[in-house]
Amino acid sequence: MLKNTGMLFKLVILALLGSLALSACGAGTPNLTPTPTVDIGAIQTFAVSTFASGLTQTAIAMPTNTPTYTPTGTTQLTPARTAIPTVSCYGLVGVKDVTVPDNTPMVPGQTFVKTWLVKNTGTCTWDAGFKLVFYGGDAMGGVTLVLTNAVSPGAETELSVSMTAPSKTGTVRGNWLMSTTNGTFFGDELFVIINVGGATSTATVTPTMTVTQTPTTSSGN
């Protein structure tokens, strides 16, 4: 639109110049036909109004320059996920030591069987194949115990492991844990504590003297 307006302005100027040239050329010859007077002010006003009108139409035709946001980069923000804790349905609580109470005295190399009474406090059954596994301390020769029978929730059972007191003296402890067939531990830690080389107390019996008096019999004469 601006280009067309400029061309129109140029044509008006050329027409004005041409009219002036013709007037100059005909000055020496008789003018049979009266030449209309050109109003230069009117032509300038017309040119200016035409140019202004063209600018107005161009401004209307142009789209509004509305700024738009264009994201840069390829990084996408991922909303944070809240970790949901999972709770195992398996549970075990030690009820009591059936054999070898804590700090039981032993001699080096003494063999014994440690038995725990435990309870299934979870909501799932312990399947056959669950294991009581050595977890830390001194195993004292004990090996993994594999359950041969299932244990239902709320039921109690005894777990027994054969062991041998080590040759070293002092307090010895071994820790054991129950695990599922895939190796997931659960429940209370079961342990055995013995004192190797500890002397047992022996009661000493002290003899006492008992005096028995025999009554004297007098014979009569």
Image: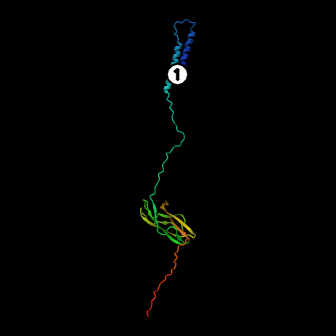
Q: Quadrant of the C terminus?
A: bottom left
Residue type, numbered disc 1: Thr
Q: Is residue 155 above or below residue 23?
A: below
Q: Residue furthest bottom?
A: 221
Q: For this rendering, which residue is in front, 120 or 69? A: 120
In the picture provided, is 96 more to the left or to the right than 109? left
Q: For this rendering, which residue is in front, 26 or 180? A: 180
For the point 50% across and 23% down, the residue is: 56
For the point 51% across and 71% down, the residue is: 112
Decide: few, some or many residues near mark 1? Use Cα within 10 Å; few <14, some 14-19, many ≥20. some
- Residue 20, visible in the rendered structure: yes
Colour style of the rendered protein structure: rainbow
For the point 53% across and 14% down, the residue is: 41
Percent position of residue 171, x then y: 55, 67
Q: Residue 72 lies in what quarter of the image? A: top right
For the point 56% across and 68% down, the residue is: 170
Q: Residue 73 lies in what quarter of the image? A: top right
Q: For this rendering, which residue is in front, 23 or 86? A: 86
Percent position of residue 193, x then y: 52, 67
State the SS at label 1.
Answer: helix
- Residue 149, visible in the rendered structure: no
Q: Residue furthest front?
A: 221
Percent position of residue 125, x then y: 43, 61
For disc 1, the marked residue is 5
